[in-house]
Image (cartoon, helix red, strand yellow):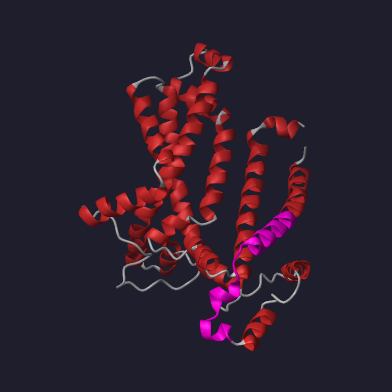
Amino acid sequence: MPLHLYILRRVVFVIPVLLGITLMAFLIANAVPADPINANLSQRAMSDPEIVAAFRREWGLDKTLPEQYVTYIANLLQGNLGRSIKSRQLISDDIARFMPATIELATYGILVGVTLGITTGMISAIWRNTWMDATARTISLIGVSVPVFVLALIGLYVLHVKLGLTAGPGRLDFTMTPPPTVTGMYTIDALLAGQWNVFTNALSHLVLPSLVLGLFIAGIISRVTRSSMLEVLGMDYLRTARAKGLAERTVVIRHAFRNATIPIVTVIGLSYGSLLSGAVLTESIFAWPGIGRYMYRASTSQDFPAIMGVSLLFAFIFVMVNLVVDILYYFLDPRIRQS
Protein backbone atom coordinates (compact mmCIF):
# COMPACT_ATOMS: atom_id res chain seq x y z
CA MET A 1 0.00 0.00 0.00
CA PRO A 2 1.39 3.45 -0.90
CA LEU A 3 2.33 5.64 2.05
CA HIS A 4 -0.07 8.47 1.16
CA LEU A 5 -3.06 6.10 1.03
CA TYR A 6 -2.02 4.53 4.34
CA ILE A 7 -1.83 7.94 6.01
CA LEU A 8 -5.11 9.09 4.43
CA ARG A 9 -6.92 6.02 5.76
CA ARG A 10 -5.62 6.70 9.28
CA VAL A 11 -6.54 10.40 9.12
CA VAL A 12 -10.11 9.59 8.04
CA PHE A 13 -10.53 7.41 11.12
CA VAL A 14 -9.41 10.32 13.34
CA ILE A 15 -12.42 12.55 12.54
CA PRO A 16 -15.22 10.42 14.08
CA VAL A 17 -12.97 9.62 17.04
CA LEU A 18 -12.47 13.30 17.84
CA LEU A 19 -16.17 14.02 17.39
CA GLY A 20 -17.08 11.22 19.77
CA ILE A 21 -14.55 12.50 22.30
CA THR A 22 -16.06 15.99 22.22
CA LEU A 23 -19.46 14.47 23.06
CA MET A 24 -18.02 12.33 25.86
CA ALA A 25 -16.07 15.25 27.35
CA PHE A 26 -19.16 17.45 27.22
CA LEU A 27 -21.40 14.87 28.89
CA ILE A 28 -18.87 13.98 31.59
CA ALA A 29 -18.18 17.64 32.39
CA ASN A 30 -21.89 18.35 32.77
CA ALA A 31 -22.59 15.12 34.67
CA VAL A 32 -20.46 16.27 37.61
CA PRO A 33 -22.84 16.93 40.55
CA ALA A 34 -21.59 20.47 41.11
CA ASP A 35 -22.60 23.95 40.07
CA PRO A 36 -19.99 26.32 38.61
CA ILE A 37 -21.93 29.19 40.17
CA ASN A 38 -21.07 27.97 43.66
CA ALA A 39 -17.40 27.58 42.69
CA ASN A 40 -16.99 30.97 40.98
CA LEU A 41 -19.35 33.43 42.70
CA SER A 42 -19.09 34.72 46.23
CA GLN A 43 -21.84 34.15 48.79
CA ARG A 44 -22.88 37.77 48.48
CA ALA A 45 -23.14 37.57 44.67
CA MET A 46 -25.08 34.32 44.87
CA SER A 47 -27.72 35.99 47.02
CA ASP A 48 -28.52 38.37 44.15
CA PRO A 49 -30.75 36.64 41.54
CA GLU A 50 -29.82 39.15 38.86
CA ILE A 51 -26.11 38.43 39.20
CA VAL A 52 -26.76 34.68 39.10
CA ALA A 53 -28.98 35.03 36.01
CA ALA A 54 -26.37 37.20 34.29
CA PHE A 55 -23.67 34.63 35.07
CA ARG A 56 -25.79 31.85 33.56
CA ARG A 57 -26.47 33.89 30.42
CA GLU A 58 -22.81 34.85 30.02
CA TRP A 59 -21.61 31.25 30.08
CA GLY A 60 -24.61 29.71 28.31
CA LEU A 61 -25.77 27.81 31.38
CA ASP A 62 -29.36 28.97 30.83
CA LYS A 63 -29.57 26.84 27.67
CA THR A 64 -30.40 23.15 27.43
CA LEU A 65 -27.56 20.63 27.16
CA PRO A 66 -28.19 19.93 23.42
CA GLU A 67 -28.12 23.67 22.71
CA GLN A 68 -24.89 24.06 24.70
CA TYR A 69 -23.28 21.19 22.80
CA VAL A 70 -24.30 22.53 19.38
CA THR A 71 -22.91 25.95 20.33
CA TYR A 72 -19.69 24.33 21.54
CA ILE A 73 -19.22 22.38 18.29
CA ALA A 74 -20.00 25.47 16.19
CA ASN A 75 -17.35 27.46 18.05
CA LEU A 76 -14.93 24.55 17.83
CA LEU A 77 -15.23 24.39 14.05
CA GLN A 78 -14.17 28.04 14.00
CA GLY A 79 -11.10 27.25 16.10
CA ASN A 80 -12.62 28.73 19.25
CA LEU A 81 -12.23 26.59 22.37
CA GLY A 82 -14.16 29.11 24.44
CA ARG A 83 -13.21 31.30 27.37
CA SER A 84 -12.19 30.12 30.82
CA ILE A 85 -14.58 30.99 33.64
CA LYS A 86 -11.70 31.13 36.12
CA SER A 87 -9.04 33.09 34.22
CA ARG A 88 -11.43 34.99 31.91
CA GLN A 89 -8.91 34.32 29.14
CA LEU A 90 -9.32 32.42 25.90
CA ILE A 91 -8.68 28.74 26.59
CA SER A 92 -6.43 28.56 23.54
CA ASP A 93 -4.29 31.33 25.08
CA ASP A 94 -4.17 29.50 28.42
CA ILE A 95 -3.12 26.29 26.68
CA ALA A 96 -0.44 28.14 24.71
CA ARG A 97 0.90 29.54 27.98
CA PHE A 98 0.94 26.31 30.01
CA MET A 99 1.57 23.63 27.38
CA PRO A 100 5.24 24.42 26.56
CA ALA A 101 6.27 23.65 30.15
CA THR A 102 4.57 20.26 29.92
CA ILE A 103 6.10 19.52 26.51
CA GLU A 104 9.55 20.32 27.85
CA LEU A 105 9.13 18.16 30.95
CA ALA A 106 7.51 15.30 29.00
CA THR A 107 10.26 15.30 26.38
CA TYR A 108 13.07 15.09 28.91
CA GLY A 109 11.09 12.51 30.89
CA ILE A 110 10.54 10.27 27.87
CA LEU A 111 14.22 10.54 26.91
CA VAL A 112 15.20 9.32 30.38
CA GLY A 113 12.54 6.60 30.28
CA VAL A 114 13.49 5.32 26.82
CA THR A 115 17.21 5.27 27.63
CA LEU A 116 16.79 3.44 30.94
CA GLY A 117 13.93 1.23 29.79
CA ILE A 118 15.47 -0.11 26.58
CA THR A 119 18.88 -0.54 28.21
CA THR A 120 17.60 -2.49 31.23
CA GLY A 121 15.14 -4.45 29.07
CA MET A 122 17.84 -5.59 26.66
CA ILE A 123 20.24 -6.45 29.48
CA SER A 124 17.51 -8.44 31.17
CA ALA A 125 16.70 -10.37 27.99
CA ILE A 126 20.27 -11.04 26.85
CA TRP A 127 21.50 -12.20 30.27
CA ARG A 128 18.30 -13.97 31.22
CA ASN A 129 18.13 -15.62 34.68
CA THR A 130 21.39 -14.02 35.86
CA TRP A 131 22.04 -11.42 38.55
CA MET A 132 21.97 -8.74 35.84
CA ASP A 133 18.50 -9.89 34.83
CA ALA A 134 17.35 -9.81 38.45
CA THR A 135 18.77 -6.31 38.97
CA ALA A 136 17.18 -4.94 35.80
CA ARG A 137 13.81 -6.49 36.64
CA THR A 138 13.99 -5.07 40.17
CA ILE A 139 14.60 -1.57 38.80
CA SER A 140 11.66 -1.90 36.40
CA LEU A 141 9.45 -3.26 39.17
CA ILE A 142 10.27 -0.29 41.39
CA GLY A 143 9.54 2.11 38.55
CA VAL A 144 6.15 0.54 37.83
CA SER A 145 5.06 -0.19 41.41
CA VAL A 146 6.10 2.87 43.42
CA PRO A 147 3.62 5.76 42.98
CA VAL A 148 5.00 8.78 41.16
CA PHE A 149 4.32 11.15 44.04
CA VAL A 150 6.31 8.88 46.40
CA LEU A 151 9.29 8.88 44.02
CA ALA A 152 8.97 12.66 43.70
CA LEU A 153 8.93 13.26 47.45
CA ILE A 154 11.82 10.85 48.07
CA GLY A 155 13.82 12.45 45.27
CA LEU A 156 13.22 15.95 46.62
CA TYR A 157 14.19 14.98 50.14
CA VAL A 158 17.27 12.91 49.29
CA LEU A 159 18.71 14.53 46.16
CA HIS A 160 17.73 18.15 46.81
CA VAL A 161 17.35 18.68 50.57
CA LYS A 162 19.94 16.23 51.96
CA LEU A 163 22.56 15.92 49.23
CA GLY A 164 21.98 19.13 47.29
CA LEU A 165 22.68 17.39 43.99
CA THR A 166 19.66 18.74 42.13
CA ALA A 167 17.73 21.99 41.96
CA GLY A 168 14.44 22.42 43.78
CA PRO A 169 10.88 23.00 42.52
CA GLY A 170 10.08 25.47 39.77
CA ARG A 171 11.48 26.00 36.29
CA LEU A 172 14.20 28.47 37.33
CA ASP A 173 15.81 29.86 40.46
CA PHE A 174 14.07 32.93 41.87
CA THR A 175 17.10 35.03 41.00
CA MET A 176 17.00 34.04 37.32
CA THR A 177 15.04 35.85 34.61
CA PRO A 178 13.28 33.67 32.01
CA PRO A 179 14.72 33.83 28.49
CA PRO A 180 12.89 35.69 25.70
CA THR A 181 9.88 33.61 24.74
CA VAL A 182 10.13 31.83 21.41
CA THR A 183 8.91 28.28 22.05
CA GLY A 184 8.01 28.64 25.74
CA MET A 185 10.51 25.91 26.61
CA TYR A 186 13.21 27.50 28.72
CA THR A 187 16.10 25.26 27.69
CA ILE A 188 15.48 25.84 23.98
CA ASP A 189 14.73 29.55 24.35
CA ALA A 190 17.87 30.04 26.43
CA LEU A 191 19.98 28.34 23.77
CA LEU A 192 18.40 30.46 21.04
CA ALA A 193 19.16 33.58 23.06
CA GLY A 194 22.69 32.43 23.88
CA GLN A 195 21.99 32.61 27.63
CA TRP A 196 24.07 29.66 28.83
CA ASN A 197 23.59 30.41 32.52
CA VAL A 198 19.81 30.31 32.09
CA PHE A 199 20.10 27.10 30.07
CA THR A 200 22.14 25.29 32.73
CA ASN A 201 19.82 26.53 35.48
CA ALA A 202 16.69 25.44 33.62
CA LEU A 203 18.31 22.08 32.86
CA SER A 204 19.20 21.58 36.53
CA HIS A 205 15.54 22.13 37.45
CA LEU A 206 14.50 19.54 34.87
CA VAL A 207 16.76 16.79 36.20
CA LEU A 208 14.70 15.65 39.18
CA PRO A 209 11.14 15.80 37.73
CA SER A 210 12.25 14.21 34.44
CA LEU A 211 14.06 11.49 36.39
CA VAL A 212 10.90 10.77 38.42
CA LEU A 213 8.76 10.55 35.28
CA GLY A 214 11.49 8.67 33.45
CA LEU A 215 11.74 5.96 36.12
CA PHE A 216 8.03 5.29 35.89
CA ILE A 217 8.09 5.14 32.08
CA ALA A 218 11.33 3.11 32.12
CA GLY A 219 9.67 0.39 34.17
CA ILE A 220 6.96 -0.07 31.54
CA ILE A 221 9.34 0.12 28.57
CA SER A 222 11.81 -2.27 30.22
CA ARG A 223 9.21 -4.99 30.74
CA VAL A 224 7.91 -4.70 27.16
CA THR A 225 11.46 -4.66 25.77
CA ARG A 226 12.42 -7.76 27.75
CA SER A 227 9.39 -9.80 26.70
CA SER A 228 9.67 -8.71 23.06
CA MET A 229 13.41 -9.44 22.93
CA LEU A 230 12.98 -12.87 24.56
CA GLU A 231 10.40 -13.76 21.94
CA VAL A 232 12.66 -12.69 19.08
CA LEU A 233 15.84 -14.21 20.50
CA GLY A 234 14.26 -17.64 20.30
CA MET A 235 13.56 -17.41 16.56
CA ASP A 236 15.23 -19.77 14.08
CA TYR A 237 16.65 -17.01 11.88
CA LEU A 238 18.79 -15.76 14.79
CA ARG A 239 20.30 -19.20 15.27
CA THR A 240 21.00 -19.19 11.54
CA ALA A 241 22.68 -15.78 11.82
CA ARG A 242 24.91 -17.05 14.62
CA ALA A 243 25.72 -20.17 12.62
CA LYS A 244 26.91 -17.97 9.77
CA GLY A 245 29.50 -16.48 12.10
CA LEU A 246 27.96 -13.06 12.70
CA ALA A 247 29.15 -11.27 15.82
CA GLU A 248 26.77 -11.45 18.78
CA ARG A 249 26.46 -7.66 18.85
CA THR A 250 25.35 -7.67 15.21
CA VAL A 251 22.86 -10.46 15.86
CA VAL A 252 21.33 -8.67 18.83
CA ILE A 253 21.25 -5.09 17.50
CA ARG A 254 20.70 -5.49 13.77
CA HIS A 255 18.46 -8.56 13.76
CA ALA A 256 16.87 -9.15 17.18
CA PHE A 257 16.24 -5.60 18.37
CA ARG A 258 15.13 -4.38 14.96
CA ASN A 259 12.40 -7.01 14.83
CA ALA A 260 11.37 -6.40 18.44
CA THR A 261 10.77 -2.67 18.01
CA ILE A 262 7.05 -2.68 17.11
CA PRO A 263 5.67 -3.27 20.64
CA ILE A 264 8.41 -1.04 22.05
CA VAL A 265 7.46 1.83 19.73
CA THR A 266 3.83 1.37 20.72
CA VAL A 267 4.45 1.67 24.44
CA ILE A 268 6.84 4.61 23.93
CA GLY A 269 4.20 6.46 21.92
CA LEU A 270 1.46 5.86 24.49
CA SER A 271 3.80 6.81 27.34
CA TYR A 272 4.78 10.06 25.65
CA GLY A 273 1.11 10.83 25.02
CA SER A 274 0.30 10.30 28.69
CA LEU A 275 3.16 12.61 29.74
CA LEU A 276 2.01 15.29 27.29
CA SER A 277 -1.47 15.02 28.78
CA GLY A 278 -0.06 16.45 31.98
CA ALA A 279 1.54 14.69 34.91
CA VAL A 280 -0.66 16.37 37.52
CA LEU A 281 1.02 15.00 40.64
CA THR A 282 4.55 15.60 39.39
CA GLU A 283 3.75 19.12 38.23
CA SER A 284 2.08 19.91 41.55
CA ILE A 285 4.94 18.58 43.70
CA PHE A 286 7.62 20.34 41.66
CA ALA A 287 5.60 23.57 41.22
CA TRP A 288 5.78 23.06 37.48
CA PRO A 289 3.38 25.44 35.66
CA GLY A 290 2.17 22.92 33.10
CA ILE A 291 -1.12 21.85 31.60
CA GLY A 292 -1.69 19.27 34.36
CA ARG A 293 -1.87 21.94 37.06
CA TYR A 294 -4.10 24.04 34.80
CA MET A 295 -6.48 21.09 34.38
CA TYR A 296 -6.50 20.49 38.13
CA ARG A 297 -7.45 24.11 38.88
CA ALA A 298 -10.14 24.01 36.20
CA SER A 299 -11.61 20.85 37.73
CA THR A 300 -11.69 22.19 41.28
CA SER A 301 -13.37 25.44 40.16
CA GLN A 302 -15.91 23.68 37.90
CA ASP A 303 -14.55 25.59 34.90
CA PHE A 304 -16.50 23.58 32.32
CA PRO A 305 -15.18 25.36 29.18
CA ALA A 306 -11.58 24.84 30.32
CA ILE A 307 -12.26 21.21 31.28
CA MET A 308 -13.72 20.46 27.86
CA GLY A 309 -11.00 22.39 26.03
CA VAL A 310 -8.17 20.59 27.80
CA SER A 311 -9.94 17.22 27.49
CA LEU A 312 -10.15 17.75 23.75
CA LEU A 313 -6.48 18.69 23.71
CA PHE A 314 -5.56 15.49 25.55
CA ALA A 315 -7.63 13.44 23.13
CA PHE A 316 -6.02 15.17 20.16
CA ILE A 317 -2.57 14.44 21.58
CA PHE A 318 -3.28 10.73 21.94
CA VAL A 319 -4.86 10.53 18.48
CA MET A 320 -1.84 12.26 16.92
CA VAL A 321 0.60 10.07 18.84
CA ASN A 322 -1.24 6.97 17.64
CA LEU A 323 -1.16 8.33 14.10
CA VAL A 324 2.60 8.82 14.30
CA VAL A 325 3.02 5.30 15.72
CA ASP A 326 0.91 3.89 12.88
CA ILE A 327 3.11 5.68 10.35
CA LEU A 328 6.21 4.24 12.03
CA TYR A 329 4.64 0.78 11.71
CA TYR A 330 4.60 1.34 7.95
CA PHE A 331 8.39 1.60 7.93
CA LEU A 332 9.07 -1.03 10.60
CA ASP A 333 6.79 -3.79 9.35
CA PRO A 334 7.19 -4.74 5.67
CA ARG A 335 3.91 -6.68 5.81
CA ILE A 336 1.98 -3.40 6.01
CA ARG A 337 3.70 -2.03 2.89
CA GLN A 338 2.88 -5.23 1.00
CA SER A 339 -0.80 -5.35 2.01
Q: Is residue 279 above or below residue 113?
A: below
| Left or right of 164 in this view: 97 | right
Q: Residue at x 74, y 46 (%)?
A: 10
Percent x, y for residue 67? 78, 70
Determine if residue 272 is in view: yes
Q: Residue at x 61, y 49 (%)?
A: 321
- The stretch in magenta equals 18-47
Percent x, y for residue 228? 53, 28
Residue 40 drawn in magenta: yes
| Left or right of 161 in this view: 54 | right
Quadrant location of residue 284? bottom left
**Nearer-the-camera pick, 121 or 243:** 121
Q: Is residue 35 above or below residue 276?
A: below
| Left or right of 17 in this view: 162 | left
Percent x, y for residue 197? 32, 66
Q: Quadrant of the N terminus?
A: top right
Q: Residue at x 56, y 17 (%)?
A: 235
**Nearer-the-camera pick, 13 or 196:** 13
Percent x, y for residue 207? 35, 54
Q: How many marks?
A: 0
Q: Quadrant of the C terminus?
A: top right
Residue furthest toward the top?
A: 243
Residue 43 drawn in magenta: yes
Q: Is residue 139 above or below residue 275?
A: above
Q: What secondary structure predominates along the stretch shown in magenta?
A: helix
Determine if residue 183 is in view: no
Q: Is residue 228 above or below residue 221?
A: above
Q: Residue at x 67, y 79 (%)?
A: 56
Residue furthest toward the left?
A: 162
